[in-house]
Image: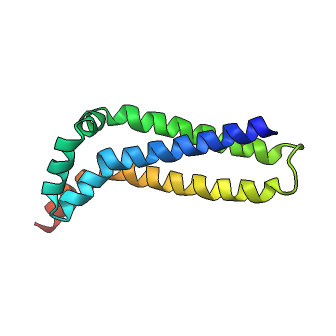
């Protein structure tokens, strides 16, 4: 039971960290430039040059994040079906589902910003102009 809890919590933490990393490398710069804060992006890129490398290989970052999130959902599903689950574990599972749902939403927003935001913006610009 304790080993399952550690694995579930580790996969949740990893998924959350990777989702935030994907947001930082790909979604946050797009949002900042859209808001007219391109100088902030330039400053961050000069201070943290590994973010530039990470954004160049965003497909690997997003693939790893997706795999960890799928694994986390699978772990939660198995933990919810486990007959060894104690009554107090139900509350823990509910919170883990909520955290994982937030992770998934953050990941979805980052993927949208990294891959779809520019084409959508260009399409809207073309249709209005």
Q: Residue visible at 38% across and 44% down? A: 22
The answer to whether 95 appears left or right of 49 in the picture is: right
Relative image position of residue 128 (x, y in whole percent) = 15, 68
Q: Which residue extends farthest bottom?
A: 128
Whether residue 93 is visible to the viewer of this picture, yes or no, is yes
Q: Residue at x 20, y 43 (%)?
A: 47
Residue 105 location (% of width, % of height): 49, 56
Residue visible at 23% across and 52% down in the picture = 118
Q: Nearer the viewer, residue 38 or 3?
A: 3
| Residue 77 placement: quadrant | top right
- Left or right: 50 in relation to 65: left
* Residue at the left extreme, as displayed: 129
Residue 112 is situated, as x and y percent measured from the top left of the image, at 36, 52
* Residue 115 appears in the figure: no
Question: Horizontal and vertical percent for residue 30?
Answer: 24, 54
Using the rendered view, name the quadrant where residue 70 is placed: top right
Q: Residue at x 39, y 31 (%)?
A: 60
Q: Is residue 34 above or below residue 16?
A: below
Colouring convention used in this rendered image of the protein: rainbow
Quarter holding the C terminus is: bottom left
Q: Quadrant of the N terminus?
A: top right
Numbered-mark total: 0
- State left or right for residue 38 relative to residue 116: left
State whether residue 13 is above or below residue 98.
above
């Amino acid at each position: 039971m304790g080993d399952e809890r550690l694995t579930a919590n580790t996969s949740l933490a990893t998924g959350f960290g990777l989702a935030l990393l994907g947001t930082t490398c790909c979604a946050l710069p797009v949002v900042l430039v859209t808001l007219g804060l391109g100088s902030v992006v330039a400053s961050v890129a000069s201070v943290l040059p590994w973010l530039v490398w990470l954004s160049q290989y965003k497909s690997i970052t997003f693939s790893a994040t997706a795999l960890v999130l799928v694994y986390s959902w699978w772990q939660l599903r198995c933990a919810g079906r486990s007959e060894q689950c104690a009554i107090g574990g139900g509350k823990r599972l509910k919170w883990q589902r909520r955290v994982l749902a937030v992770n998934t939403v953050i990941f979805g927003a980052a993927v949208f910003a990294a891959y779809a935001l520019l084409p959508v913006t260009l399409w809207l610009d073309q249709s209005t102009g």
